[in-house]
Every structure is written in C-alpha cells, then in structure tokens.
Image: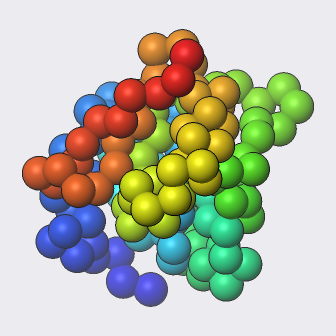
Amino acid sequence: MSDELSPRLRAIVEALPLRPGMRVLEIGCGPGAAAREVARRIGGGHVLAIDRSAKAIAQARAGCAAEIAAGRLSVRQSAVESFELAPGEAPYDLAFAVRVGALDGRHPQLEAQALARIAAALRPDGRLYIDGGDPLKEIPLPR
C-alpha cells in the first residue's frame, strides 16, 4: 500500500491542530491512509480509526500493520452513531471525519446521534473537524 496521501487528504491532515502525544479519533477511516499520517505526526500519541465497513477495517488493519504493532494506532469496526469507548479506554482529544454520511447534514436525526456519541468519546475540551470547509470546518458538539 502506498504511503502517499492524495493532495486532498494531505491538506486535511495538515489543517488538523495536531500536537505530539494527542489521542485522535478518525471517523470513517477507509483504508487508513490519513490515520497512518496522523499517527506519524503525533509521535507518542494514539489514533483510533473507526469505520462501519468490515472491508475498510480489513484494509486499514493491513495497511497500518506497522503502526498497529507499534501501539500508535488501532482500528475498530463501528458506525459513528453507535460508537462507544471501550471499558477503561481514555477519551480522545480530537476527532475528524472525511466524507461521513452521518455528518453531512442530510440525516439530522442520525447526525444528532453521531454528535452525541462523538462528544461522549472526547475530552470535555475535545474538538471535531469534518471536511467541507477550507479544507476543514469545526463542528460544535453537544456538551
């Protein structure tokens, strides 16, 4: 699998306010390209990449094997609207999503469920970014 990001994904990752040691949740990770790059940029932090698709999770697991083995990245099959932290799992500092239908405004009830789940998975000062800005926009979370 290529380590190259598309120009669009590179711009999105570069726009995230990442810092070393962060815990980052990627929603809708697909094959894991952005998750790999975020893991590289946050050093000793951790990325959890989720996707509702078993095929995407299998691709991400294969493409991110080195980062998973190093403990810098993990993957989990889950729809965002039903996502929950595992028992004892620490909350995340930041979440981001690219092309996630539950967050694109077309399904308000699903979006409300997803935003509540994301808010519950983030620290109280955690932030959510989605595509659709220039290149990202921050989405306020219910607190």
Which quadrant holds residue 43? Answer: top left
Which quadrant would the C terminus be assigned to in this image? top right
Residue drawn 47% across the image and 27% down it = 141
Residue drawn 34% across the image and 75% down it = 3
Q: Position of residue 112 (x, y in %)?
A: 57, 41
Q: Position of residue 103 (x, y in %)?
A: 46, 54
Query: How many marks overall?
Result: 0
- Camera-side residue: 109 or 20? 109
Residue 14 shows in this picture: no
For this view, does 7 lie left or right of residue 101? left
Residue drawn 72% across the image and 47% down it = 83
Q: Does residue 11 lie above or below 4 as drawn?
A: above
Q: Does residue 89 lie above or below 47 as drawn?
A: above
Q: Does residue 100 lie above or below 16 as drawn?
A: below
Q: Where is residue 85 in the image (x, y as percent from the top left)?
A: 76, 36
Q: Position of residue 22 (x, y in %)?
A: 46, 29
For this view, does 19 lie left or right of residue 56? left
Residue drawn 35% across the image and 42% down it = 129
Q: What colouring style does the render use? A: rainbow
